């Protein structure tokens, strides 16, 4: 049976095992199933998932092999990643939340193992979390080396000093740039080619602050130390240079608030979770060329 038709739950059942244990069991079950149905993947799935006793070890192994080079050895990276995930359990719990977010929000995500193995946005964020720990420990050359490898291998540029919440979805992820002093809340969804950047060469706190539950559409550019309020939505291709109030929608270049600046339209859903990109459009005829 094709894996896309299997009824895999998107959330752990309530009052049962922990999210981490439940998700890891799902990943292993999916890997066993796929190894049986696709013998060409059996060795890969065994070495990356099936042979490991925990999600932390599997994720560390996969990241290490994805990001290693001839001079940055996979064994050294594996030890580094596993030590960080074991020492800082909040990093691993955020990874679990990201896996659940991808499975729940992205219809192209056919399983937790698919996200773990193939979603470069997920892999980039997990590496940044580890690099952020190193940055906070003043191990900055190593943090920046990881930053560089992620940019080279995955085409995602997230500075190790940026602060990122949990339940994050970088959908497609190619070309995403997140600057040094950026802050991203929980349950945020960001599409490809989004920039959270500065406005010039001045130092200090110079990057955007993204609230919980925000949705940022493909190709959007958000510049400067501004705030995108909780539950706000930024339309694809928009250029945002000033604050966006909570639960409002900003679209265009330069961005404007749907409903007007004085009394903008307010939505009730959480777009970072609903992934609703177009509900602000009341008259499609206005958008037909």
Image: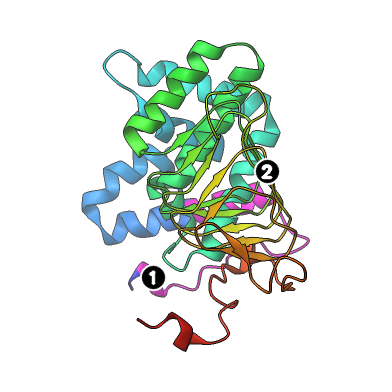
Residue 139 appears in which quarter of the rendering? Answer: top right
Q: Contact, CB < 8 Å: mark 2 with mark 1? A: no
Residue 58 to residue 251: above or below: above
The residue positioned 70% from the left and 35% from the top of the image is 90
Q: Which residues are magenta?
A: 3-27
Q: Position of residue 265 (x, y in %)?
A: 72, 74
For disc 2, the marked residue is 226
Residue hosting label 1:
4
At mark 2, the secondary structure is loop
Q: Is residue 68 visible?
A: yes
User: Residue 236: percent from the left, percent from the top?
Assistant: 48, 61
Residue 54 in view of the camera: no
Query: Along the horizontal axis of the image, is 123 left or right of 216?
Result: left
What's the image's color scheme?
rainbow
Q: Is label 2 or label 1 in front?
A: 2
Viewer-proximal residue, 121 or 269?
269
Residue 6 on the magenta segment: yes
Quarter occupied by the N terminus: bottom left
For marks 2 and 1, the one nearer the N-term is 1
Q: Nearer the viewer, residue 40 or 117?
A: 117
Element type at mark 1: helix
Left or right of 38 on screen, residue 240: right
Separation (CA) of disc 2 from disc 1: 40 Å
10 Å neighbourhood of mark 2: few (<14), some, or many (≥20)? some
Q: Is residue 69 above or below residue 42?
A: above
- 68 versus 234 height, above or below: above
Which residue is found at the position 66% from the left and 46% from the top? Answer: 166
Q: Position of residue 69 (x, y in %)?
A: 30, 21
Quadrant where the C terminus lies?
Answer: bottom left
Q: How many numbered tags mark residues here?
A: 2
In the figure, 73 relative to 62: above or below? above
């Amino acid at each position: 049976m094709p894996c896309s038709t299997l009824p895999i739950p998107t959330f752990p059942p309530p009052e049962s095992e922990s999210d981490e244990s439940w998700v890891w069991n799902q990943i292993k079950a999916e890997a066993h199933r796929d190894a049986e149905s696709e013998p060409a993947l059996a060795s890969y799935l065994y070495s990356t998932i099936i042979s490991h006793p925990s999600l932390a070890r599997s994720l560390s192994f996969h990241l290490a092999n994805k990001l290693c080079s001839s001079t940055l050895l996979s064994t050294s990276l594996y030890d580094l990643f596993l030590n960080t995930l074991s020492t800082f359990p909040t990093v691993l719990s955020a990874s679990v939340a990201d896996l659940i977010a991808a499975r729940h929000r992205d219809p192209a995500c056919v399983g937790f193992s698919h996200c773990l193995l193939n979603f470069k946005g997920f892999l980039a964020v997990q590496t940044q979390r580890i690099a952020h720990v190193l940055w906070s420990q003043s191990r900055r050359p190593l943090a920046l080396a990881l930053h560089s490898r992620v940019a080279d291998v995955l085409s995602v540029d997230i500075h190790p000093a940026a602060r990122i919440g949990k339940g994050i979805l970088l959908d497609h992820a190619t070309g995403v740039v997140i600057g040094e002093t950026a802050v991203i809340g929980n349950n945020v969804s960001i599409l490809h080619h989004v920039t959270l950047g500065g406005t010039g060469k001045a130092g200090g706190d110079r990057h955007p602050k993204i609230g919980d539950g925000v949705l940022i559409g493909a190709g959007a550019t958000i510049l400067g130390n501004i705030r995108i309020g909780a539950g706000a939505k930024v339309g694809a291709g928009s250029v945002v240079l000033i604050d966006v109030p909570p639960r409002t929608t900003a679209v265009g270049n330069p961005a404007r608030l749907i409903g007007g600046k004085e009394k903008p339209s307010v939505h009730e859903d959480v777009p970072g979770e609903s992934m609703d990109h177009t509900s602000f459009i009341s008259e499609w005829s206005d958008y037909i060329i």
